[in-house]
Image (cartoon, grey):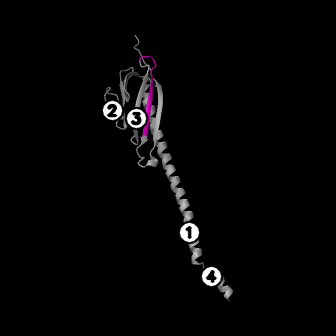
Amino acid sequence: MTGARNKFQGFTLVEMLITVSIFAIAFMIVAATFVGISRAQNKARATTETLNESSFLLEQIAREIKGKMIQSSDADSICLLDLSGEISYIYLSGNDVYLSHVDCTPSGQPLSAPNIDVNNLQFFVKNAAEEHPLTTIVLTVSNVGGSTVENKTTINFQTAVSGRQYTAVR
């Protein structure tokens, strides 16, 4: 009868502590892996969003420069003129890029998306007096939502755009 009684005996306290400890360690490993994957996913999302918005901004600027004459340019602004006499003025103010069609003075609508900060915008014009001047655009952007260091994404862009100088046909 004593053999049957030992068969239904429970676990000892030491066995229970060891089992709980093993499960706790396994849970901590799984939780740490999950947190790491979640952070990596947030960083990838922030980088992708910043890259998409920045590429769109750079394409808008390049589209404005193509097919227009360069009237003047500074390090962080450029003034353009098309055949109809319409002025396009692109400039950096604060952390936003603006486009003005009024004149070559700061006023106009922002080109940059609200979720990115433009830290640097520079225009380098080569051969401005020739028929096809080359404008190099340098752009540095970061995401606004990157409040934490791990989610902060800064991207540098550089592209060259060939403009067109038109002369009046008589």
Answer above or below: position of 131 versus 7: above
Q: Earlier in the sequence, mark 4 or mark 1?
A: 4
The residues bearing labels 3 and 2 have C-alpha atoms spaced at a distance of: 19 Å
Q: Nearer the viewer, mark 1 or mark 3?
A: 1
Residue 108: mark in rendering: 2
Pinpoint residue 143: horizontal percent, then vertical percent. Answer: 43, 43
Q: Nearer the viewer, mark 3 or mark 2?
A: 3
Residue labelled with disc 3: 120
Q: Earlier in the sequence, mark 3 or mark 2?
A: 2
Q: Residue at x 52, y 58 (%)?
A: 32
Residue labelled with disc 4: 9
Residue labelled with disc 1: 21
**For numbered disc 4, what is the local secondary structure?**
loop
The residues bearing labels 2 and 1 have C-alpha atoms spaced at a distance of: 64 Å
The residues bearing labels 1 and 3 have C-alpha atoms spaced at a distance of: 53 Å
Q: Earlier in the sequence, mark 3 or mark 4?
A: 4
Q: Nearer the viewer, mark 2 or mark 4?
A: 4
Kindly tell me whether residue 112 is visible in this rendering: no
